[in-house]
Amino acid sequence: MILPEYMKSADTNPSIILPDQTCQRFTLAEIHSASNNFDETFVIGRGGFGEVYKCTRKIGLVDQVALKRLITTSSQGAREFEAEVEVLSKLRHGNLVSLIGNCNEENEVVLAYEFMPNGNLQDLLHNTGTDLSWLQRLKICIGAARGLDYLHTGPSTQHGIIHRDVKTSNILLDANFAAKISDFGLAKVGPINQTQTFVSTRVKGTFGYMDPSYFLSGKLTRKSDVYAFGVVLFKVLSGRQAVDRSIDEEQWSLAVWVQDQIKDGKLNQIIDPRLNRQISKKIREGVFKYSSRVLV
């Protein structure tokens, strides 16, 4: 794995060094102890970079962490890993997942994050049998929106961050169900308040959340994240998947289905039946007035 310059140390065994001095460096022995030698039963997620482990044993001064372990043979995973470190080393916000430590020793590259005990929004909506109330869903969406706004407006006045993969599985939830945006492997730095407001890049993201304009043109803007977040909002409101191949083909895409319901004046069809009694008429009107602008 070739590390960017800011991650290299002066010794012969380079370790990740982050600009923020609050980021801890863990030894490989500490990582092995916390993960029980990367015990498969501790795995809570997988991606192109490798695996994520839940560690309930204390590591350093932290009681619980999630460890993201890089597969060093994965060139794409290495690029996404480096991009994530570069982004998170510059960002601090209550609605972004925090990078708290790293290990780069004996060909093992591991990042340590704050552990999110309530998992991700995707699983809560569809896989765990948990019925999130309307107020819980609102709180989660507002938190994620604040995190996304911080990314777009930027830690500096010159540049913001375009996430490029906003989706429910990348919105994590802490013990109080506070939302934290995660997974910055596809993120791009974008200009703010400049003539050129887009970044030309290879099209990447997740089908069902992807902005059609970006897909067709390859021109990435903050609006692409806003579109994807619109899909998130309607997933939360409807309880439906972004893409559902178990139903009629013309209804596979949540975004297209929502647009059709709005055009036909069937707004109530969009609401998750479990929420019907929790949403007043006034709130319904406000939700549709603002959220429908994202996709149509």
Image (cartoon, rainbow, N blue to C red):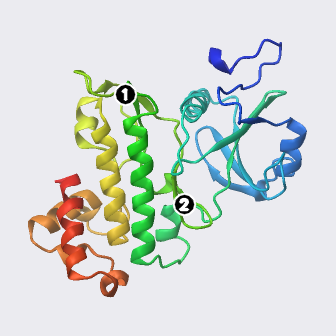
User: Is residue 150 placed above or below 218 in the rendered structure?
Assistant: below
**x%, y% of residue 108?**
78, 32
Q: Quadrant of residue 192?
A: top left
User: Is residue 7 placed above or below 137 in the rendered structure?
Assistant: above
Tell me which amino acid carries mark 2. Asn
Q: Residue at x 32, y 71 (%)?
A: 238
Q: Earlier in the sequence, mark 1 or mark 2?
A: 2
**x%, y% of residue 18?**
67, 27
> Which numbered disc, 1 or 2, marks the residue closer to the eye?
1
Q: Quadrant of residue 268?
A: bottom left
- Mark linked to residue 16: none
- In what element is the residue under mark 2? loop
Q: Quadrant of residue 273?
A: bottom left
Tell me which amino acid carries mark 1. Gly
- In what element is the residue under mark 1? strand
Left of 284 or right of it: where is 145?
right
Cα separation between marks 1 and 2: 27 Å
Residue where numbered disc 2 is placed: 120
- Mark linked to residue 190: 1
Asked whether disc 1 touches disc 2, contact meaning CB atoms under 8 Å apart, the reply is no
